[in-house]
Amino acid sequence: MARVSDTPRFTASLVDRHWLAPGILELRLTRPVEIDFIPGQFMRFAMDGYERDYTMVSTPDAETIDFCVAVVDGGRFSRDILRADIGKRFQLTGPHGHFVFQGPANPAVFVATGTGVAPFVAFCRSGVGVDAGLLLHGVDTPDRLIYREIFQSTLRDYIPCISRPFENRDSVERAYSGRVTGYLKQQLTPGTYDFYLCGRGTMIRDVTELIDDHFSDSRLFIESYD
Amino acid sequence: MKIYTGTGDRGKTSLFSGERISKSSPRLEAYGDLDELNSVIGAVVAAMDEDQPALKGEIMAIQALLLEAGAWLATTPGAASTRFLKPFTKDPAEMLEIAIDRMNAPLPELKHFILPGGHLSASLAHMARTVCRRTERRVIELAEHEDGDSGPTDTLTHILVFLNRLSDYLFVLARYCNHIQGQGDVPWQG
Ligand SMILES: Cc1cc2nc3c(=O)[nH]c(=O)nc-3n(C[C@H](O)[C@H](O)[C@H](O)COP(=O)(O)OP(=O)(O)OC[C@H]3O[C@@H](n4cnc5c(N)ncnc54)[C@H](O)[C@@H]3O)c2cc1C
């Protein structure tokens, strides 16, 4: 595991920023040539007086390093990134983290809420773990189903889990009405899996309990955004 | 980053290699004791005088090695996540042997049993030594439990040698701490 002093530092400039969905931005930054990472890893943005972590959604060999960022009310990075001019230079350290694909030992079940899909976008774009992978993406409304086409075209199975009641159900293929926990409890065939959980801590805690109760021989890999 | 996740509230935890295991499993016992050992060694450093920066640096390097060993203990042998771990080789144990010889050189020859005690730093070094011996026993238990007939991995073997040597290092360190404090060993009057 890396020591703090070993972590490489980079400068990267913002080249593009656009809305992927209501409240979710995609950022593109110039890719420092020296940077190398494994899909699923994140970079730490050293801002003025604070730091924030964001997971790459791009592949290690792409021309830019890309991130998807949930813009939250009162969030410091949320505010600063909305104000940033194209060309702004960011100080980054990384890559950090161990949330990477662990090999095909057991069928993979990827579980994400919101922008927690970021590492799975990188997996899909790099072709790791996708053949046998199932992704459950938990959102409150269907318009937040970011990167849907990538998931539909690369993963073995992709189930959007939509927690709020919504109209026009046929517009979202294979949608499950409810939370990811509901799907896991009611629909996932009993068995031994490699679960990869990414997103807010409450989802991670709830899904972990469920795994301990219903899929106890499985392996569990976690990236908490809290 | 939040300190608590709530994912271990019901007696299980995740290994670095993903398995959910009971907090009372031999693997957890082993790296829990390693963690305790590292904490006691931290107390040794804290109790030493400011005028020993080189020795403190050496001990803190040992603490870093214990973290690396702990990461190996928290990972099932052969798992894909071992790619993130630094190889644990024979070198750390050899480094300890050199350090033991260096600290031992100015010490009077041992002609009697000594009591664990003396200066606070020496007493804590003795405590660390006993925790180190217990950790070693736990790692042996793990090796016996996990590896069956195939025997322990090279990494586990290197960690065991390191722990065995570290107990000796901590014994000599305890004596050395008393020596530099000018108070010598505490002899057993039995
Ligand atoms: C390893 C790691 C990787 C991460 N990767 C990503 C990523 O790829 N994309 C991403 O969007 N975030 C990611 N995060 C979370 C990110 O680092 C920030 O915490 C988040 O973007 C909020 O930052 P902020 O400065 O805008 O808000 P803050 O000033 O930190 O928080 C303001 C308030 O908003 C709440 N809040 C924070 N996040 C959310 C949310 N998603 N929904 C609702 N409320 C929230 C906080 O609890 C707080 O009350 C990651 C976190 C970690 C630890």
Image: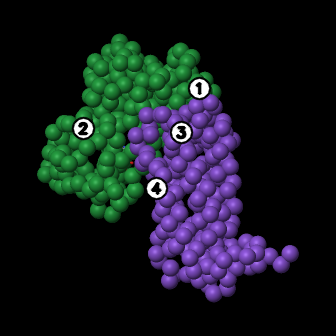
The residue pinned by badge 3 equals B153
Q: Amino acid at mark 2?
A: Pro
- Mark 3, Cα crowd under 10 Å, few <14 / some 14-19 / many 20+, is few
The residue pinned by badge 1 equals A217
Mark in the foreground, 3 or 1: 3
- Report the side of A16 relative to A170 (left or right): left
Q: Residue at x 60, y 71 (%)?
A: B173
Q: Residue furthest right?
A: B190
How far is mark 3 from mark 1, CA to CA?
Answer: 24 Å
How far is mark 2 from mark 1, CA to CA?
Answer: 32 Å
Mark number displayed over residue B91: 4
Mark 2 vs ligand 1: CB below 8 Å: no
Identify the image quadrant of residue A62.
Answer: top left
- Mark 4, Cα crowd under 10 Å, few <14 / some 14-19 / many 20+, is few
Q: How is the image coloured?
A: by chain
Q: Residue at x 53, y 15 (%)?
A: A189
Q: Are marks 2 and 4 in contact (CB under 8 Å)?
A: no
Q: Are marks 2 and 1 on the same chain?
A: yes
Q: Are marks 3 and 2 on the same chain?
A: no
Q: Amino acid at mark 3?
A: Thr
Q: Identify the chain drawn in purple.
A: B
Identify the image quadrant of residue A63.
Answer: top left
B25 in relation to A81, above or below? above
How far is mark 4 from mark 3, CA to CA?
Answer: 16 Å
Q: Are marks 4 and 3 in contact (CB under 8 Å)?
A: no
Q: Between B65 and A41, which is closer to the camera in this rendering?
A: B65
Q: What's the colour of chain A in the image?
A: green
